[in-house]
Amino acid sequence: MISHNPDITRLIDRMEKAGWVQRSRDQHDRRKVMVRIKWKGLQLLSDLDEPVLALQKRQFAALSEGQMGQLLDLLKIIDEI
């Protein structure tokens, strides 16, 4: 997920309103905010597992074995940066 800080706050606001996460402040440093996933959020993630996996399989099916190897090599280079 790529987002700017103010966007993260709004995203967490929406997730908290939906009942997916719980937000709490650190007692010693009020600037620190802890966000924990709730049961309802875990259920949502579980429901998304199958459709996301199916999408990835469809997307990568378009690549040949050689292209898949090239993609992996490029991702390794990016990971080292």
Image (tube, rainbow, N blue to C red):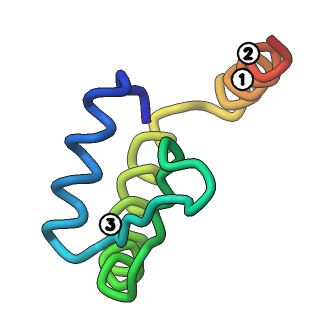
Q: Amino acid at mark 1?
A: Leu
Front one among 24 and 22: 24
Is 2 placed above or below 35 here?
above
Q: How far apart are labels 2 and 1 at the CA level?
A: 5 Å
The location of residue 53, given as percent across then percent down, is 45, 62
Rendered position, 18 above or below 33: below
Label 2 Cα neighbours within 10 Å, binned few <14 / some 14-19 / many ≥20: few
Whichever of labels 3 and 2 marks the residue nearer the N terminus, that label is 3
Q: Which residue is mark 3?
A: 51
What residue appears at the point 39 percent right and 62 percent down from the top-left corner?
Answer: 54
What residue occupies the far right of the structure in this picture? 80
Measured as percent of width and height from the top left, residue 57 is found at 47, 53
Location of residue 60 with respect to 14 vertically, above or below = above
Query: For the residue marked with disc 3, what is the amino acid?
Result: Pro
Q: Which residue is mark 1?
A: 75
Marks 1 and 2: in contact by CB < 8 Å?
A: yes
Q: Of 48 and 16, which appears nearest the observer?
A: 16
Left or right? Give the position of 54 relative to 18: right
- The CA distance from mark 3 to mark 1 is 23 Å
Which residue occupies 47% across, 52% down?
33
Secondary structure of the residue carrying tag 3 is helix
Badge 2 amino acid? Ile
- Please say if the residues under marks 3 and 1 sit with CB atoms less than 8 Å apart: no
Extreme-front residue of the structure: 28
Query: Which residue has dot 2 on it?
Result: 78
Mark 3 vs mark 1: which is more N-terminal? 3
